[in-house]
């Protein structure tokens, strides 16, 4: 499984670059885990990108998951309506 | 924090302060304007937040108190009174000073404390004595609220994040959020917002308190708030995943789309762009001349295309520098308010034509003369309320500032409905000051002209506002330096109107190209009245001064050849350009009139800047230099000698 570590900041200033990086992964791998534990700054645009990524994975029938949550990521998603239903919850890499 | 970051913060904060001042003046006039109060709160909240982030902690703390008072006013626990507006205006001035230094001195901090004490005193008093009418106050009730939120697609780019808004909602009670992501399968733009939310809030709160969470986004987001009936609370259902449109509610504020994306550019960059465009126009003129001489079809074609493009570029570049005059009108509202209070006069200040556009350079130099004129209208023009009542006029006077277009120029009018100019008093003062000898018969226009003479003042007492006689002559000079003309119209007991006619820009000039031997000159077209043919047999007097007959009157005249000591023989018939300065005709005699000429003004180098009678230069199509004449100065310098002659 491909392991991709999210950047420290995932905000409006980073999303376009991160989108490009994620799309490169999408094209190449069927199994991928995005490690969110490193994220120190996350805003709605960052969260939306992760949600979109998971939504796209479901559409393309790929096995991708978000792993390694941290408090900041948890509280942000909680306010934004929770984690996506089709994501795999895992606390350890 | 970088200096650039602080500079941007200062710039933006000062723009917010202008908005704050406008809103405070509006609220002072009509405290019921909720939109103004919200705009005021938003601006103050932004200054506070950005100030704290940029290291202006004292400013942020001071603004916090200001913001708290505004919040109380929004909630109706504090009444917006005239005294409160006055203190808040002073507080806004103080914030302007606090922007100069993130670490203010002890004196400034002391002043902050003094203002806050005054603010607290007022709020304390009014919160008790002006409790709001119960009928206007919404009582918090425990209930379920349905809140539909559809952020605008540009929210993220505009700097509005959903998380803080939802967090504020969550702070009101128990919040349950259902999210929908309606992103396109292809062409997903990570910087656009495709999210929508439906929230259920269980809280003992009011709709107004919920709306407060959206205060910064209310103009751009679709927000629908409705209270669920208690029995239907259990029926709250999540929206379907495919739901994309929120139901419109009458209470939803209409989205105000700003179609144009704005960027902030230093004016020096625009000046440089203008300079380059000017160079291009000159090169274009040279190419045109070469093409016409060469008779080469292809070269002519390219030259014509370049002409079209460069003129379009020039017009666009000039257009970028144009700003609405309303951007300086705002500051006069405050001026009039403060002065009228200090003079004990009641004034209604009316502005018209704020959208009229002027070159930024002209606009920057226009503020001070207009301040002088408005001050004079207030101090000398308008009568006291008692005087007005006894004259059968309304207690409150009117000062009107109007901008409009007139024949391709800008017309500004400052008018008042005061007592008008007392011509007798002006004459007496002029004679007493030695500006006029006994027995001189003057028309009303000539008498009004005397008030623009240096050192002239008719005020019985010198006040802080005006009356030192140093204002009106400076006004006249300033307007003339902008290639403008100024005239006065006054009627006893009815009021005075001062009209200023200005060019829209100083970067280009519509001129009349004239020649003396091989030297070329440009006379600003705005000043030209007429061209007449004159015989060259009449010799000039001292420094080229002489008299020519114009419309059966002898008109003072300068022969440019003599003024600038240009060698060569005079033609048999010369051309005299009659210009009008101070409403008096004045002639400039030249060898030949080449024709109308629109050109880019070039500043003179330091060596030539002090050359009398010349205000700039331009490069002609053949690469030569033509001097642009300062006709007002030529007339002013020549007249005393002519009168002596």
Image (cartoon, rainbow, N blue to C red):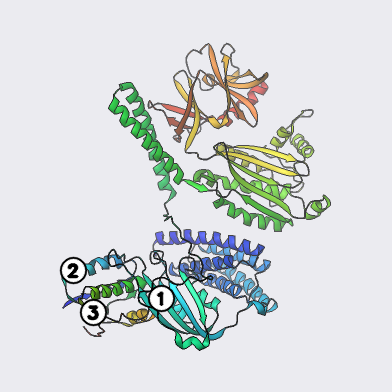
* Residue found at x 46% / y 24%: B520
* Residue found at x 75% / y 30%: B442
Name the residue that disc number 2 marks.
A27
Work out whether B544 lies above or below B474. Answer: above
Residue mark closest to the camera, 1 vs 3 = 1
Whole-angstrom CA distance, mark 1 to mark 2, is: 31 Å
**Secondary element at image label 3:** strand
Q: Position of residue A68 (x, y in %)?
A: 26, 82
Q: Residues within 10 Å of mark 3 (few under 14, many from 20)?
A: many
Q: Residues within 10 Å of mark 1 (few under 14, many from 20)?
A: many
Whole-angstrom CA distance, mark 1 to mark 3, is: 24 Å
Name the residue that disc number 1 marks.
B197
User: Residue A65 has which mark?
Assistant: 3
Q: Position of residue B166 (x, y in %)?
A: 43, 77
Pointer 3 chain: A
Whole-angstrom CA distance, mark 2 to mark 3, is: 16 Å
């Amino acid at each position: 499984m491909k392991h991709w570590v999210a950047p420290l900041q995932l905000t409006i200033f980073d999303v376009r670059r991160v989108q490009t990086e994620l799309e490169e992964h999408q094209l190449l791998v069927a199994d991928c885990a995005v490690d969110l534990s490193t994220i120190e700054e996350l805003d709605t645009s960052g969260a939306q990108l992760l949600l979109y990524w998971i939504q796209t994975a479901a559409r393309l029938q790929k096995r991708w998951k978000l792993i390694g949550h941290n408090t900041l990521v948890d509280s942000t998603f909680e306010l934004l309506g929770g984690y996506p239903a089709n994501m795999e919850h895992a606390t350890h890499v | 924090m970088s200096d650039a970051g602080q500079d941007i913060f200062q710039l933006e904060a000062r723009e917010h302060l202008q908005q704050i001042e406008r809103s405070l003046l509006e609220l002072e006039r009509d405290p019921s304007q909720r939109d103004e109060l919200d705009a005021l709160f938003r601006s103050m909240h932004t200054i506070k937040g950005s100030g704290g982030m940029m290291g202006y902690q004292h400013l942020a703390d001071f603004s916090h108190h200001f913001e708290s008072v505004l919040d109380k006013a929004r909630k109706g626990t504090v009444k917006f009174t005239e005294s409160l507006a006055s203190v808040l205006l002073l507080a806004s001035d103080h914030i302007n000073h606090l922007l100069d230094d993130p670490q203010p001195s002890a004196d400034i901090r002391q002043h902050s404390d003094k203002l806050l004490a005054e603010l607290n005193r007022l709020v304390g008093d009014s919160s008790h004595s002006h409790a709001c009418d119960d009928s206007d106050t919404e009582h918090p009730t425990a209930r379920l609220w349905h809140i539909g939120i559809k952020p605008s697609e540009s929210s993220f780019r505009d700097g509005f994040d959903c998380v803080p808004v939802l967090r504020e909602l969550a702070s009101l009670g128990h919040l349950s959020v259902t999210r929908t992501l309606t992103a396109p399968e292809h062409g997903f733009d990570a910087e656009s917002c495709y999210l929508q939310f439906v929230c259920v809030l269980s809280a003992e709160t009011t709709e107004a308190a919920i709306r407060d969470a959206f205060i910064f986004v209310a103009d751009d987001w679709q927000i629908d708030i409705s209270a669920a009936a208690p029995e239907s609370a259990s029926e709250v259902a999540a929206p379907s995943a495919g739901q994309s449109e929120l139901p419109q509610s009458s209470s939803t504020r209409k989205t105000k789309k700003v179609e144009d994306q704005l960027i902030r550019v230093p004016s020096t960059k625009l000046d440089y762009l203008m300079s380059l465009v000017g160079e291009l126009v000159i090169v274009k003129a040279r190419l045109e001349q070469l093409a016409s001489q060469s008779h080469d079809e292809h070269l002519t074609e390219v030259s014509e295309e370049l002409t079209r493009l460069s003129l379009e570029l020039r017009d666009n570049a000039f257009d970028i520098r144009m700003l609405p005059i309303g951007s300086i009108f705002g500051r006069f509202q405050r001026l009039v308010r403060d002065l009228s209070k200090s003079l004990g006069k009641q004034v209604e200040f009316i502005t018209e034509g704020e959208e009229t556009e002027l070159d930024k350079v002209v606009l920057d130099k226009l503020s001070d003369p207009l301040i002088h004129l408005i001050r004079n209208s207030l101090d000398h023009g308008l009568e006291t309320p008692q005087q007005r009542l006894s004259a059968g006029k309304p207690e409150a006077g009117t000062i009107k500032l109007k901008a409009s277009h007139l024949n391709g120029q800008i017309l500004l009018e400052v008018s008042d409905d005061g007592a008008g100019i007392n011509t007798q008093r002006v004459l007496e003062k002029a004679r007493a000051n030695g500006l006029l000898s006994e027995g001189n018969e003057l028309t009303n226009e000539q008498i009004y002209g005397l008030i623009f003479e240096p050192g002239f003042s008719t005020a019985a007492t010198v006040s802080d506002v005006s009356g030192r006689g140093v204002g009106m002559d400076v006004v006249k000079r300033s307007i003339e330096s902008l290639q403008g003309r100024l005239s006065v119209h006054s009627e006893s007991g009815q009021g005075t109107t001062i009209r200023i006619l200005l060019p829209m820009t100083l970067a280009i000039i519509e001129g009349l190209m004239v020649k003396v031997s091989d030297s070329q000159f440009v006379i600003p077209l705005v000043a030209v009245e007429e061209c007449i043919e004159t015989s060259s047999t009449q010799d000039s007097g001292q420094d080229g001064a002489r008299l020519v007959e114009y419309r059966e009157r002898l008109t003072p005249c300068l022969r440019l050849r003599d003024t600038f000591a240009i060698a060569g023989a005079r033609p048999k018939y010369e051309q005299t350009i009659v210009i009008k300065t101070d409403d008096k005709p004045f002639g400039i005699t030249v060898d030949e009139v080449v024709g109308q000429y629109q050109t880019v003004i070039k500043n003179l180098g330091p060596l030539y800047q002090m050359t009398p009678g010349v205000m700039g230069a331009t490069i002609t199509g053949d690469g030569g230099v033509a001097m642009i004449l300062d006709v007002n100065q030529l007339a002013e310098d020549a007249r005393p000698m002519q009168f002596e002659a």
